[in-house]
Image: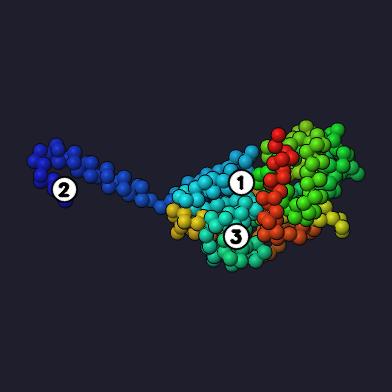
Amino acid sequence: MLRLSWFPDLAIRSYILFLLILVLLSCTATSSPEVVVYTSVDQVFSEPILKEFAKETGIKVLPVYDVESAKTTGLFYRIMAESSHPRADVFWNGEFAQTLLLKKKGLLDVYHSPEAMEISSIYRDRDGYWTSFSARARVIIVNTDLVSTPDFPTSIFDLINGRFNSMGVAVAYPLFGTSATHAAAIYTALGRPKAREFFRYLASSGAYIVSGNSVVRDMVASGKAAVGLTDTDDACAAILKGAHIKVIFPDQGREQMGTLIIPGTVSLIARCPHPENAKKLIDYLLSKKVEERLFQMGWSYERVHRGKSRNRCFGARQIKKMQLTPEQVCEHLEEAMSELKEIFVR
């Protein structure tokens, strides 16, 4: 043990005492609680929520956000690359397919959050590897200055039948985020041959294949494209800005497959460095408070907690949904991505 009496000079004693205080303060600072979250929920929505969690709990949040051009997929591969020494504690994902793929690869851990008990069973993994926190829908948006009401598309197949080629069709690369999840759902619903045919027509039709759903929204809102395929959160943002657009929930006919609803997911990373803090963050993200916040900000289309939903942009409406489970869609994800890389990546 270091004794100040060993140092007879007062100045030296003071200096040693100063150094000891600095060391103690440093140790205290580095031992403050923290949690690392990887999230594909747009930063404009996720950052305020994470800051509120930090303020309420005193747990420092270290977020890693994705970029629009590699939505979810970049974070998925990062978690894969770090699997032997995980850096992330929580994966807060704006969709579900990549989450289920991580579960399949053994990179998630079980956590039955008490908040999950308030969420409908269809929106949580029965084994406890993931739970949904809100859901969005895949929709067609139409520029009403360019397309009249009788000519509005009603199906995703209207995007490939040539009706809008001269006015412009915009879609995001079907290799990332919700676009990839939607592609896997189309493979699941149609089967491989018909799905491949659909995407080949889309790639060869002259459609704008852009980096993300927000780009699709902006192109349609500005009139650079007449129609586009995007998510309800992006469509809602355009509506709130007063854009001249109409939102179509596609394939609502009796013989049609319905609109895809995509729940976001929260999961615990296996062997994560801060498991207890991670569980606290997961509980927070699954709370009704956060769901309501996302709903009011326009990120969510549908609540996952039991009860009625009324979206600020679309109201309360009954829509025909694609009758697919997350597990069914995930089964076709890798198959779809393999073929779509050949079709869309030159």
Mark identifier at residue 264: none
* In the image, residue 148 above or below residue 98: above
User: Mark 3 is on which residue type?
Assistant: Thr
Residue 138: image location, x then y, percent: 74, 49
Residue drawn at (35%, 47%) of the image: 29
Whether residue 310 appears in this view of the structure is yes
Residue drawn at (57%, 55%) of the image: 105
> Which residue is identified by label 3?
131
Residue drawn at (27%, 43%) of the image: 22
130 or 103: nearer the viewer: 103
> In the orientation shown, which residue stands out farthest toward the left?
8
Residue 136 placement, left or right of 42: right
Residue 100: image location, x then y, percent: 62, 56
**How far is the residue under mark 2 from the one under mark 3?**
52 Å
Whether residue 215 appears in this view of the structure is no
> Which residue is identified by label 2?
2
